[in-house]
Amino acid sequence: LDRNTSGLVVFGKNLPALQALENLFKDKTEIDKVYEALVFGNLTKKMEIDLPLIKDANSGLVRVGKAKEGAKSALSIVTPNKLYSDVTLVNVSLITGRTHQIRVHLASVGYPVVGDGKYGNFEMNRIFKDTYKFENQFLHAKSIEFKNIQGVLSYLSNKKFLAPLPKEEQEILNELR
């Protein structure tokens, strides 16, 4: 997870489990990851964001790029969950898993993550921080679902793990209502 992202973290307790997890995350067909984010703007319909990403090794920043310059394919599916006056709570399904993918994808289509200090709307972040005393990015690893898993991790087959929003973020949503 990115720093300041809350929610689920997956790790292997031993080398075979770690290697199996790495293979699952590379293959991407037997695992579903869903994040929850609060974004600036009113997103009213489901969207696919299919924009290749490239990381600048010097700055550590990621941007939308072109394949000819080394950008890697990146696909996110964004579904509005709850609309508030000037922000929207969305679910984001990662089809690929690139560095900063959610944050860069959402910002690039005009819906930056609330509190994102790298790719966000800095003026709106300041206002949000002053209003709600919230200093992180509003991005949460909400669920991970394992499909038909073979081998050492077969006990995870057809299991889904959920992490509720942290109290601070849930309180902000309650205030927004």
Image (spheres, rainbow, N blue to C red):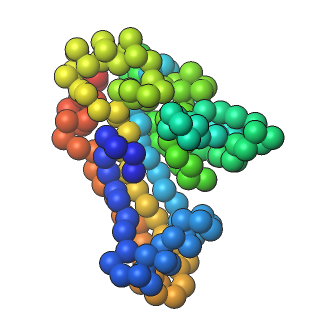
The residue at the point 36 percent across, 68 percent down is: 11
Residue 80 relative to residue 162: left or right: right
Residue 144 relative to residue 43: left or right: left
Examine the rendering and report whether any part of residue 38 can be seen: yes
Residue 114 relative to residue 33: left or right: left
Indicate whether 62 appears above or below 110.
Answer: below
* Residue 102 location (% of width, % of height): 51, 40
Q: Quadrant of residue 49?
A: top right
* Residue 13 location (% of width, % of height): 33, 78
The residue at the point 39 percent across, 51 percent down is: 1
* Residue 10 location (% of width, % of height): 37, 65
The residue at the point 41 percent across, 37 percent down is: 37
* Residue 128 location (% of width, % of height): 30, 18
Front residue of 162 and 27:
27
Indicate whether 15 appears above or below 177.
Answer: below
Indicate whether 19 appears above or below 7.
Answer: below
Residue 86 relative to residue 68: left or right: left
